[in-house]
């Protein structure tokens, strides 16, 4: 029997939208099994250019954030189905940036001023924060999701019941993402791509960068996934071998408030990095966002919970 021909489509930089909306016109219509090649700009849609001063972060047009490629209309997908998205390839652009935007981030009150750092990417295996601090480049799409059945435009910044701005760093090439379908065709979109990010994205940015990426779409009929949830399968390999290579420095904060615990775990990690590695507080915060992982250690021993921050020692050479 002849092998079915691979059907491929392209969603270019101009085929974008900035809000979730079931009324958005599809950029492409595909059959299950088709592959779509995307090209997207970094999260500010070109408002930040390499070398801009940090003050530019206070002048952003928030209506031009999150340029999402799509939407992709997948034929046969109807409400109650599950959309399967296979991540085939992710290629960062030549550069990226990480910054602190006033009012945003886990420690917004601690860092009220704008701050920005730029990184060379391309085919590099690591991004250099300092000559002796290198962050593994592990690209992924920060935002992947489907339109919901809600009326009118919906902001991208917070996740929705159709996923969206989930910032899940293990959605790398070889992974499969599963999303509930709320409207005909699913209307999938993606963007907000990162060259690197730790779990938590604590300063509110990863390495924000342009990206080209390829996805394959399938439909699981009557999958009946819970709204406000998503699932994924990772490749059969260690999740973070580069980070595990030298062990971790960990800080755990205890108390009755998970958010306060998370903040204190990151604060104390910043304190350790600045003392032991002589980084500025700003660069230590950025390093936490790009390389460290924030995890709930225990949530069953009420009334006090534990939140830990893991800093991989492999980033320090």
Image: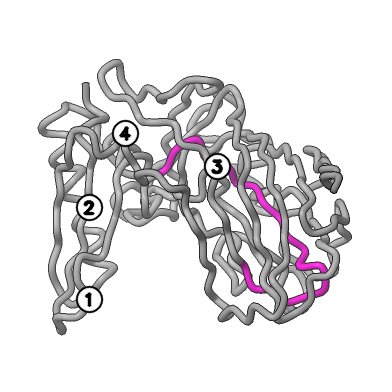
In this rendering, position of residue 110 left or right of residue 255: right
Q: Look at the numbered disc 1 and give the secondary structure of its residue.
A: loop
Look at the numbered discs 3 and 4 and tell me whether their residues touch, using CB distance below 8 Å.
no
Which image quarter is the C terminus in? top left
Q: Look at the numbered disc 4 and give the secondary structure of its residue.
A: helix
Q: Residue at x 83, y 70 (%)?
A: 76
The relative height of residue 75 versus residue 72 in the rendered view (above or below) is below
**Label 3 neighbour load within 10 Å: few <14, some 14-19, many 20+:** many
Look at the numbered discs 1 and 4 and tell me whether their residues touch, using CB distance below 8 Å.
no
Q: Residue at x 58, y 59 (%)?
A: 177
The relative height of residue 294 versus residue 78 in the rendered view (above or below) is above
What percent of the width, then of the height, locates residue 10? 82, 40
Q: Label 1 to label 4, Cα distance in Å?
A: 28 Å
Q: Which region is colored magenta? A: 179-197
Q: Label 3 to label 4, Cα distance in Å?
A: 16 Å
The residue pinned by badge 3 equals 173
What percent of the width, then of the height, locates residue 300? 19, 80
Colour basis: one colour
Mark 2 or mark 4, whichever is nearer to me: 4
Of label 3 and label 1, which has the lower sequence position? 3
Look at the numbered discs 2 and 4 and tell me whether their residues touch, using CB distance below 8 Å.
no
Of label 1 and label 2, which has the lower sequence position? 1
């Amino acid at each position: 029997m002849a092998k079915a021909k691979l059907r491929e489509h392209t969603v270019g930089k101009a085929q974008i939208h900035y809000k979730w909306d079931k009324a958005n016109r599809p950029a492409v219509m595909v059959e299950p099994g088709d592959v779509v090649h995307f090209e997207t700009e970094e999260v500010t849609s070109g408002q930040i250019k390499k070398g801009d001063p940090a003050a530019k972060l206070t002048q952003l047009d928030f209506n031009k954030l999150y340029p999402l490629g799509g939407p992709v209309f997948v034929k046969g997908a109807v409400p109650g189905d599950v959309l399967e998205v296979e991540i085939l390839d992710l290629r960062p652009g030549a550069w990226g940036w990480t910054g602190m935007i006033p009012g945003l981030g886990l420690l917004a009150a601690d860092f009220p001023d704008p701050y920005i750092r730029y990184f060379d990417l391309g085919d590099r295996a690591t991004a250099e924060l300092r000559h002796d601090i290198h962050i593994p480049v592990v690209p992924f799409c920060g935002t992947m999701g489907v339109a919901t059945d809600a009326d009118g435009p919906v902001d991208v910044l917070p996740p929705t019941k159709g996923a969206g701005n989930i910032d899940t760093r293990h959605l790398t090439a070889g992974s499969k993402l599963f999303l509930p379908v709320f409207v005909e065709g699913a209307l999938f979109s993606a963007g907000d791509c990162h060259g690197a990010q730790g779990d938590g994205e604590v300063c509110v940015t990863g390495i924000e960068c342009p990206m080209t990426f390829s996805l394959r779409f399938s439909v699981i009929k009557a999958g009946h996934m819970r709204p406000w949830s998503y699932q994924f399968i990772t490749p059969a390999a260690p999740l973070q071998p580069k980070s595990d290579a030298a062990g971790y420095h960990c800080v755990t904060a205890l108390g009755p408030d998970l958010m306060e615990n998370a903040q204190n775990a990151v604060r104390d990690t910043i304190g350790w990095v600045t003392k032991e590695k002589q980084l500025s507080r700003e660069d230590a915060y950025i390093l936490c966002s790009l390389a460290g992982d924030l995890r709930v250690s225990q949530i069953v021993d009420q009334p006090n919970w534990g939140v830990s921050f893991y800093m991989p020692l492999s980033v320090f050479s």
